[in-house]
Amino acid sequence: MEKKPMKENRVRSPQLRSLNSTIICPPSGSSARERVHSVDPYGFERLEDFDYESYEELMSEYLAVLTRRSIRWSKLLQGRGRLEKSIKVKRYVRKGVPNEHRGLIWMSASGAQEHLERNPGYYHSLLDTTKQQHDPKLVDSIRTDLNRTFPDNVQFRKTSSPCLQKTLYNVLLAYGHHNPAVGYCQGMNFIAGYLIIITKDEEKSFWLMDTLLSRILPDYYTPAMLGLKMDQEVLGELVRTKAPVVWQAMGQHNVMWTLVVSRWFICLYIDVLPVETVLRIWDCLFYEGSKILFRVALTLIRNQQAEVQQAGSLPDVCDSFKHMTRGPFVEDCHTFMQKIFTEPGSLSMATITKLRETCRARIIAEES
Amino acid sequence: MGSDEAYNFVFKVVLIGESGVGKSNLLSRFTKNEFNHDSRTTIGVEFSTRTIQLKSLIIKAQIWDTAGLERYRAITSAYYRGAVGALLVYDITKHLTYESVERWLKELYDHADPHIVVMLVGNKTDLGSERSVPTEDAKDFAEKNGLLFLETSALESTNVETAFQNVLGEIHRKVSSKEVTRGSISAVSLSSPVPRAAGDPEEKKPCCRNL
């Protein structure tokens, strides 16, 4: 089998190419397997059963989209270091931010840039042991997960240089000190990891993390995880009206939402959906807020209604939720992102806010 | 999808214990005979099944795995529902993971069936030179608390099969003996044929299903 030597080769040369160069200038070869890199543009090794043929086919179309978007974005930005929000920019974001501008757009659209500029030196002071003793319990729980964060990403390997594990450790430790009520929660390691891959900057990753956890998302990661429980219930309520057969199946088999969707919310779709699709979702998450998470969930669920309906048991329901997040439907990120804005129908922030209030009150009442 | 084979019992078993003790690898070693050196942090809840023969019976073991971090217990009440067995795992090289065993036990008894079969499992015996939890200590603790006990290595595949087999065997013993009365463990463990819902495609199979 030729797979083994290829893998070794990957480890020895972990240089990453930008997304565009990977697609525009693929290595020559006679099969898709030879033409497409076995490590993706973000450093993730492709799985053994990765379908190179379909990927290449998909990419040949997506490349045209990316090129067009890239030209439009360059024109829009024209060397500016930030952007003003507008209907036009929102439309642009929904169509995808080119990877070379992602860090900038996320920082700018989410308000993280403003926080960074208003607090010079703050990030580094959080890591300065002369100013603050590191909390040993926090250090220990972060360390437990360092080797377990993207072991399939060449940039996070202990042997790679530079190794992003140290960067990851710093961002998580700084965040834990900055927000002791949250400290460290598993899942944050994956989020910080993505932020580091995209921004390639510790301080920016920290401020994006802060923006996500303090302003964009409800309280998902606090010890009571109330925001997470709330959003799981909110999704349940939305499914009740927008995919009633699924809602019925959940009740029939006694499946609690947390069993099937907790990872979707906690990891913001990392490791749930393909990398490129997750990044497209995050473009909108940073620009439009957490509502986007429900649009994605509803689109996935509605697309698989028939299978959930046919499920004969709780494990079958759980399996059908796993199937939702695989296959061409989610791999074709551009079409998928168009679908999330049409498929679930109207979904106003007012609706979400109201449902959140109701669900939060219900959970608190149940728990007391 | 999962329910194609015939079986006499489905037993739900949960894996609990601190983060990083090897719960996910114990699961994959038992259900797939795989060990992953590069495993990722478990988020949310995962489960896997394996069907085993126990004397003349076919038992479908449904093993549930979840994140070990303390706060995840906030969302895992569903995790314990219907569980008839538990493997409470600690890492023999990390004393702190052993010290929290009592806390986990309390958590388990707060949420699960009082007759749940519990095995204390000291994992990572392949790292014997770094051991910080003496076998005798854990054994004594298990005896005092009425728990089964075994040390395992998911990496070297030591005792993993035995651990699960013993727990499943003990569950079966409890279910079939009169030790457990109705309304308790038997209610969740799917004892012999349960009437099927109308239209169930598996009507003729000699098995029971209850999840």
Image (cartoon, rainbow, N blue to C red):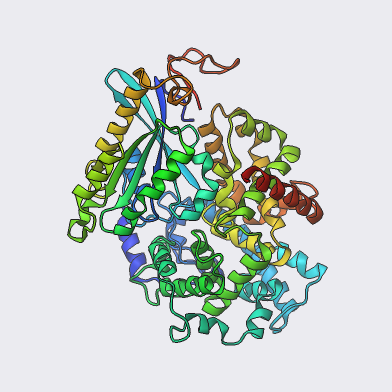
Q: Residue at x 46, y 54 (%)?
A: B70
Q: How many marks?
A: 0
Picture coordinates of residue A116, whole percent (x, y): 63, 81
Residue A154 against residue B162 in the figure, above or below: below
Picture coordinates of residue A330, whole percent (x, y): 60, 50
Q: Is residue A348 left or right of residue B121?
A: right
Q: Quadrant of residue A110?
A: bottom right
Q: Is residue B34 left or right of residue A39?
A: left
Residue A244 against residue B129 in the figure, above or below: above
Q: Nearer the viewer, residue A193 or B97?
A: B97
Residue projecting furthest to the top: B204
Q: Residue at x 47, y 26 (%)?
A: B188
Q: Nearer the viewer, residue A232 or A197?
A: A232
Q: Residue at x 27, y 20 (%)?
A: B55
Q: Quadrant of residue B161?
A: top left
Q: Nearer the viewer, residue A76 or A150?
A: A150
User: In this view of the protein, can residue A299 be seen by the observer?
Assistant: no
